[in-house]
Amino acid sequence: MFFTAVFFISLLALPAQAEISGIAFERDLEYDKAIIQYRAEIAATEEAFGQYDFSLHAPLMGLARSQQQQRDYAGAFASIQRAQHLSHRQGGVHTPLQLEGLEIMTQIYLAQDKPLMADKQQRFAYYVSSRHAGPESLEVLPAIEKLAQWYTKTGQLQRARELNEQGIEIVESHFGENTIKQLPYLQQLAKLKRLQRVCCSTRVMEQALSLVENNLEIPNELRATTYLDVADAYTISGDEDNAANYYQKAWGLMSPIVRQETFATPHRIVFSRPLNDRRSISTKVFRIEQDMFGRRDFRQLNRGDLLTMESLPPQEFVMTEDDDNYNVRILDRTANRDFEHEPAMRTVGTPFKFLHKQLLQILPVRFRHDEVLAEVEMEFQFEVDNEGRVHDVELLTNDAPAKLARTMREAVRKSRFRPRMEDGILVTTKNYRLTQKFPK
């Protein structure tokens, strides 16, 4: 009896020991060893408790993560699917236990250039969270924020706006219409409006400003962040006086370290802007349409159609906030579009982002290969004045194709920056440098 009990306890200990070792190898980026260790744990657990025991879930997910890192995508999918089956047995079809697997599948589909499948995983993850927490509960807010971020980074801006508006409604219903918990959603709405080039990001931030100024107990850090976002919105709209006022208010609330981090150099602001305005306004483009009876007619394409028409040169640019945006734009299914686009389009470039197929129209044949384009780095030097406007754009590198250089100069010239500050005063920055890249 004593021997049997000791043997049973040792079997119970096997999976836990293996799991710790597997995680340790994974944390040390030794994925080959992690895969071996996770498989050993899975085998020991199956032998002890059977192939449907839920304790298999953790090592299966560890195995999937390690297989993903090794680009064994088929193996990772198989591990995730088995883990999902166990999670469904444990918590039902809508259990949040499957969320990690959905995130890994998203990353795999992106790596395989299947953005619509990645989008499907993100939307299903939100559905799972919503069903589990309740669509109007506070617990669903992290899922709303996560999906809104996904939509923003994949160009589904209208959907992102709707989710942020939903977040505002939820916090208002729980905390009242004057709650400062609206601030993160208002800040994101302002950025989305600038990316969509619709009116008016300043009005959104003025709403945020009203919340801040009517809540005297707000921490200085949050108040300063709000003032910065208000000022950025005014900078993009061209209201330099109001922008300067709120930059100075933000400065006054910051510690010396934060001031240095925020204002030591010009800072790029998220927004989008069309290129070649005059030419595009005067150009009329038509396409042949055929109705259900086979009758044909010409329809003039509107501005929205032209912006994403892949046979044209770059029509717009997006100034990104960071460099980890996904290189894909998924067309908003909620947008009113009847022009026949592909549902997903590739984008390229950082910090200035363009539609990939439009960029190809201005590139020599040799540069249309991803490997060659990825080697292009364009360093610009220019002046950022105390209103955030750009002057005297100079390209310092000379190995870029001529048409690409002209397009980039135009994009840089039309960009706007948060100005540098010294002693609370906005100042001009000469010889500011920015490097444009086109990673795969």
Image: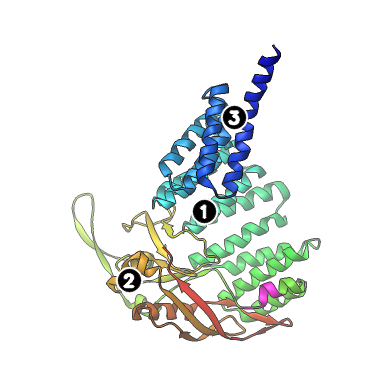
Do residues under tags 1 and 2 come within 8 Å of each other at their CB atoms?
A: no
Number of dots carrying numbers: 3
Helix, strand or loop for disc 1: helix
Q: Amino acid at mark 2?
A: Phe
Tell me the residue at 67%/56% (across/down): 182
Residue denoted by label 1: 150
Toward the right, the furthest residue is: 217
Mark 1 and mark 2: span between their CA atoms? Answer: 30 Å
Residue 369 in sight from this viewpoint: yes
Q: Which of 235/420 is in front?
A: 420
Q: Amino acid at mark 1?
A: Trp
Position of the N terminus, as image quadrant, is: top right
Position of the C terminus, as image quadrant, is: bottom left
| Badge 2 density bin: few <14, some 14–19, many ≥20, Cα 10 Å | some
**Dominant secondary structure (helix, strand or loop) of the stretch shown in magenta:** helix
Toward the top, the furthest residue is: 1
Mark 2 or mark 3, which has the lower sequence index?
3
Residue denoted by label 2: 367
Mark 3 and mark 1: span between their CA atoms? Answer: 31 Å
Q: Which percent across, then down, holds residue 150?
A: 52, 53
Residue 71 tag number: none
Q: Which percent across, then down, holds residue 32?
A: 50, 44
Residue denoted by label 3: 55
Q: Which residues are magenta?
A: 260-265
Q: Which percent across, then down, holds residue 236?
A: 56, 74
Q: Is residue 410 above or below residue 288?
A: below
Q: Is residue 122 left or right of residue 347?
A: right
